[in-house]
Image (spheres, rainbow, N blue to C red):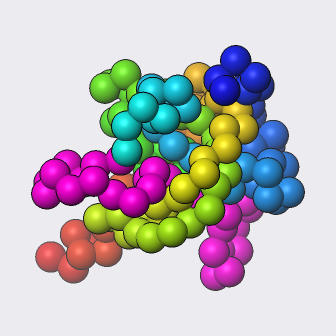
């Protein structure tokens, strides 16, 4: 599985894969082999979920900024997982339900590519330089 995966190095490359529909999802985990050994579990309830939790990469219809801005935001959403030994990788699969954070749960995951540390660094820089990273509207009303 992972041995056949290539590596994506830039947001532009990631954008191409997403636009073509080749890699519609991002996942942070030890990788495809480790994921195939156990199901995703809801950490708060302990319940086993009916699929693998993923982060969708396609921009919604209301998004009018460049696709790379959206992708940078999505890549940065779970960066905390890196500290726990996870690696970002791209995959496709069939959505079957939603997880506790309203993330898609997919079955029949098909690994596509690893996300390079260079892409993560590019995403982090773009996210923080082009968007109001981490800003919540509720904080501004106080």
Identify which residue is drawn at 67% across, 51% down. 92
User: Which of the 4 image quadrants contains residue 115?
Assistant: top right
- Residue 137's spot in the image, x, y percent? 31, 74
From the image, which quarter does the C terminus lie in?
bottom left
Identify which residue is drawn at 60% across, 51% down. 108
Q: How many marks?
A: 0
Identify which residue is drawn at 59% across, 23% down. 117
Identify which residue is drawn at 68% across, 80% down. 61
Residue span colored magenta? 40-69
- Residue 27's spot in the image, x, y percent? 51, 43
**Left or right, 51 with reference to 142:** right
Q: Would residue 43 be counted in the magenta stretch?
A: yes
Q: Would residue 130 be counted in the magenta stretch?
A: no
Q: Main secondary structure of the magenta part?
A: loop
Query: In the picture shown, does residue 48 fall above or below 113?
Result: below
From the image, which quarter does the N terminus lie in?
top right
**Left or right, 35 with reference to 4:** left
6 or 40, nearer to the observer = 40
- Residue 25's spot in the image, x, y percent? 61, 52
């Amino acid at each position: 599985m992972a041995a056949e995966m290539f590596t994506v190095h830039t947001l532009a490359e990631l954008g191409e894969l997403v636009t073509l529909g080749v890699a519609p999802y991002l996942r942070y985990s030890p990788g495809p082999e480790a994921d195939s050994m156990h199901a995703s579990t809801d950490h708060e309830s302990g319940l086993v979920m009916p699929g693998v939790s993923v982060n969708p990469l396609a921009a919604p219809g209301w998004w009018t900024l460049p696709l790379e801005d959206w992708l940078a935001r999505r890549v940065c959403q779970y960066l905390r997982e890196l500290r726990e030994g996870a690696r970002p990788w791209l995959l496709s699969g069939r959505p079957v339900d939603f997880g506790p954070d309203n993330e898609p749960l997919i079955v029949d995951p098909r690994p596509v590519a690893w996300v390079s540390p260079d892409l993560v660094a590019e995403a982090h820089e773009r996210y923080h330089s082009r968007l109001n990273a981490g800003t919540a509207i509720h904080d501004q009303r106080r």
